[in-house]
Image (tube, coloured by chain):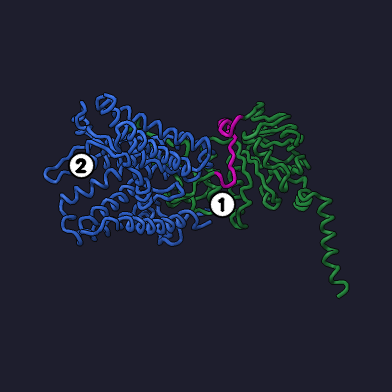
Amino acid sequence: MSAPAGKERHAATDGAAPLLEVRGVSKYFGNVIALKDISCRVGAGEVTCVLGDNGAGKSTFIKILSGVHQHSEGEFLVEGEAVRFSSPRDARDRGVATVFQDLATVPLMSLWRNFFLGSEPTVGAGPLRRIDVKTAKRVMHEEMAKMGIDVRDADQPVGTLSGGERQAVSIARAVYFGAKVLILDEPTSALGVKQSGVVLRYIVQARERGLGVIFITHNPHHAWPVGDRFVVLNRGRLMGDWDRGEISRDELVKTMAGGAELDQLTHELESAIERPAAPG
Amino acid sequence: MSQAITPPPATPAPMSVVDDRLSEVGFVTKLLRRPELGALLGALAVGIFFAVTAESFRTLSGMANWTDVASTLGIMAVVVALLMIGGEFDLSAGAMTGTSGLLLGLLTTEWGLSMWPGIVLTVAFAAAIGFTNGYMVMKTKLPSFIVTLATFFILQGVNLGFTKAITGTVRVAGLADVPGANSAEILFSSTFWEPHNFRISLIWWIAITIAATWVLSRTRLGNWIFAVGGDANAARNVGVPVQRVKILLFTITSTAAALVGIMIALRLGSIQAGQGIGEEFTYIIAAVVGGCLLTGGYGSAVGASIGALIVGMAFIGIQFSGWNTDWRFLFLGVILLMAVLVNNLVRSSAEGARR
């Protein structure tokens, strides 16, 4: 799985171990094989897209990466070191942060409160220990500015933001609290076309800041413009693993939909459409 | 590239970007974002109304009267508001005030304890009940509504049953003669500012409101209270100890109920077995009038206090105006309905405006 020559973006990771790598990972729930023999990796400044239809094993895969589940077989390496996360918190401490779809922010709370929730900066001691609101707001402004978002009002409730902006808050927060690898769980699935574009830009932004991004999606059209590597899952198994340039967008769409199955479907649909036209 | 985050469309914010971005949010927007605004306007309206209909309402002695009613109610409304912001209910809070007063009475008049050890034991007992409430809600994952409803009925039964079994009546009396009663009365039930006689509970109420406001707006715990009520799952995902925060809130609510029970028992020197029954709803009404959402995650301590003030003004105002006091229930119902409608608007503008 070495990167082809002439791709500078991968140069940094060719020598060193990738930020995150799984080798031959499987996951069994009782006698159900949820995942079988999955390998994939992401380096600094790279986006690895994990694609798959519903039931392909994407959520099981993300839960292993984020520390919710543990893998049954195979190797899970972070910066070359074998790991076994016991919780999402454990994963976060190792620099692997997951932005779960729609479970990352509290809508009624203000931007700055959401940004620091669970890790509030404080000043003072004893009963006078309090949140350092000034620092919190300033840092939030700065971090959001790095994402290209100009926050006007730190007290604005997060619920009044658009879906894309809310994803941005989660991403900015994860980056600020030391994430090296960002795992994004279907960040575009609930969004419209324009908002999806906004989120894709944030992904590019995170990549350019040197993070490794694992982008999980069922939409090849969202994966294609930002991905450096594409991993396609189907029914818990690895369907294929390509670097950018090794596969065209159409091939990617086709593989995702199950290749031959899609041809068959197209064929059936075409004949179904033609049939009523023939007698008439 | 810059996807500027703008306030909700309904608000007139200037579009130009200047350095101090906070000043761009209009004063009106900031005001509307405060949960206690509606309650404040309501309090003004109710206050002016009764000041016109009843002469004694607008004197300082009249004020001592309605702030007295509002104070014990307000202490409970504030802690119930914290619990509601944290996304839970406590229907046993009213009965708990009775249980605490009765326990203190029995400990001191029947079982020979002097006042201060009795008070310490009562508070500890109440805290344990609150902890149990919270623990059961967390472990069973049942709605707190149903768990504390059970606690409510258990306490109500225990209050009546024990009191009758031990004293042969439905009240415990004679607290004023217990050793140490005098010093306890100074702290919990004395009056100040002759000749108007404001109750010391007013000071407790104001202090607790200030403390709760501080906690909510400036401490990590406050941030966590909003988070566990707003979206417990999201809070857990970022490492907030959801269960501990909620159990703490239940414990605080019960402890405050003990404080109020002790105040009432010491004030009258006796306490009825039915004390506090039905008041749990008044606390919740005061909190909701003060801007707390029934769904959690939003509200304020000051708002709950203003809600309690409205209820206190209405109870005394109706009496001073010479009307039948039964009308106060109608009044409570109407202000609750109005408050819920206003809160609904607030919530939709805060949560769903630009999805």
Q: Is residue B262 left or right of residue B142?
A: left
Q: Amino acid at mark 2?
A: Arg
Tell which of B38 and B130 is nearer to you: B130
A97 drawn magenta: yes
Closer mark to the observer between disc 1 and disc 2: 2
Give coordinates of residue A14: x percent, y percent: 70, 33
Badge 1 is on which residue?
A164
Q: Are marks 1 and 2 on the same chain?
A: no
A237 drawn magenta: no
Identify the residue shown where x is 84% and y is 55%. Answer: A264
Badge 2 is on which residue?
B199
Q: Is residue A148 left or right of residue B260?
A: right
Q: Colour of chain A?
A: green
Write down the chain letter for disc 1.
Answer: A
> SS class of the residue under badge 1?
helix
Rendered view: B333 above or below B76: below
Give coordinates of residue A232: x percent, y percent: 74, 44
Identify the residue shown where x is 20% and y is 61%. Answer: B53
First to last magenta residue range: A86-103
Give coordinates of residue A32: x percent, y percent: 75, 36
Question: Can residue A27 be seen by looking at this rendering?
Answer: no
Question: Can residue B78 be seen by looking at this rendering?
Answer: yes
Which label was assigned to residue B28?
none
Please identify the quarter of the rendering in which residue B7 is found.
bottom left
Circle 2: is it few (<14), some (14-19), or many (20+) Cα within 10 Å?
many
Q: Colour of chain B?
A: blue
Tell which of A78 and B316 is nearer to you: B316
Give coordinates of residue A108: x percent, y percent: 46, 49
